């Protein structure tokens, strides 16, 4: 099975994720750069990693990632945010420095659960982490996940979606496979990022547009629900809940 890592980047360099995890990674790592930072990343990283120009915004970037992975002949691709510091990954024994191990576990997960999209546990509380791999109806975090490539990336994210790409992708893959996959014994801690400032639009118009687009696409299928608004840092964001619903299949 060929697996590639795509670091999706909107931020100026150096890319924190590469400094944290690339040195001993045995998988091919490519950078998919927003047009605004493509020249900088190409100048800095070409010769070390392949750098491709992606789209502008979460929708076009995600579509480009699915299609790039297909063009590169991958069986699966692992998406990493560009701002992951050391100690992002954790299991019951402590922090995980070995990205190879995390990727291998994601591979095992999609194979065992027979899903096209899988991620890590939503908690880094060691006492809450379980064992093995599960099919789930829950949301897969956008910061680290594995997915099947596709030359029709629009099936998994709308090109005009301004934010909440993880919600859209989780719902889309759920409708396709009846579930998504979860590595239950590895947690993902995005709160540690020293660049913990979103590159996605946070204005009311963008958050409302994302809410409406997701509800229009998936509300009728009963896989995701909007539970109102929550406030973070003086801005409001949709409170999304993935729903078990009739589509969920515990077994493939």
Image: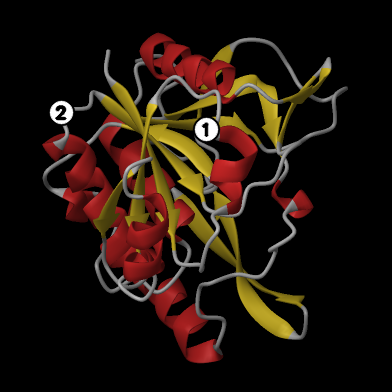
Q: Which mark is residue 31?
A: none
Q: Is residue 186 above or below residue 29?
A: above
Upstream in sequence: badge 2 or badge 1: 2
Across and down, in percent, residue 248 comes to: 42, 31
Tell me which corner region of the image, top left, top right, bottom left or bottom right, holds residue 130.
Answer: top right
The image quadrant where one finds the C terminus is top left
Mark 1 packing: few (<14 Cα in 10 Å), some, or many (20+)? many
Q: Residue at x 27, y 31 (%)?
A: 148
Say which of 73 and 221 sits in front: 73
The image quadrant where one finds the N terminus is top left
Q: How many numbered callouts?
A: 2
Q: Secondary structure at mark 1?
A: strand
Q: Residue at x 57, y 81 (%)?
A: 202
Say which of 150 and 15 sits in front: 15
* Residue 222 appears anywhere in the view: no
Tell me which corner region of the image, top left, top right, bottom left or bottom right, holds residue 126.
Answer: top right
Q: Residue at x 33, y 59 (%)?
A: 42
Across and down, in percent, residue 221 comes to: 34, 51
Say which of 185 and 82 sits in front: 82
Across and down, in percent, residue 161 comes to: 34, 70
Of all residues, the one furthest to the right in this rendering is: 127
Mark 2 packing: few (<14 Cα in 10 Å), some, or many (20+)? some
Q: Which residue corresponds to mark 1?
A: 119
**Spatial separation of the CA atoms under disc 2 and disc 1:** 21 Å
Q: Which residue corresponds to mark 2?
A: 73
Q: Is residue 176 above or below residue 200?
A: above
Across and down, in percent, residue 132 comes to: 61, 10
Left or right for 163, reference 190: left
Foreground mark, 2 or 1, reads 2
């Amino acid at each position: 099975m060929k697996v590639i890592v795509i670091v999706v980047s909107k931020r100026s360099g150096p890319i924190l994720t590469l400094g944290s995890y690339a040195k001993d990674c045995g998988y091919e790592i490519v950078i998919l750069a927003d047009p605004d930072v493509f020249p900088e990343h190409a100048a800095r990283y070409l010769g070390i990693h392949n750098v491709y120009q992606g789209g502008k915004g979460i929708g076009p970037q995600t579509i480009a990632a699915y299609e790039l992975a297909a063009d590169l002949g991958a069986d699966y691709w692992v998406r990493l945010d560009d701002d992951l510091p050391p100690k992002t990954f954790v299991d019951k024994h402590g922090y995980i420095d070995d990205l190879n191990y995390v990727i291998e576990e994601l591979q095992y997960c999609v194979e065992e659960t027979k899903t096209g999209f899988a991620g890590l546990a939503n908690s880094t509380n060691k006492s809450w982490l379980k064992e093995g791999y599960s099919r789930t109806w829950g949301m897969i975090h956008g910061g680290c996940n594995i997915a099947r490539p596709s030359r029709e990336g629009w099936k998994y994210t709308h090109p005009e979606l301004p934010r909440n790409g993880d919600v859209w992708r989780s719902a889309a893959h759920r409708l396709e496979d009846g579930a998504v996959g979860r590595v239950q014994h590895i947690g993902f801690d995005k709160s540690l990022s020293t660049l913990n400032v979103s590159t996605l639009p946070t204005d009311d118009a963008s958050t409302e547009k994302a809410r409406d687009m997701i509800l229009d696409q998936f509300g009728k299928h009963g896989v995701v629900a909007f539970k109102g608004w929550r406030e973070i840092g003086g801005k409001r964001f949709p409170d999304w809940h993935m729903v078990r619903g009739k589509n969920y299949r515990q077994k493939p």
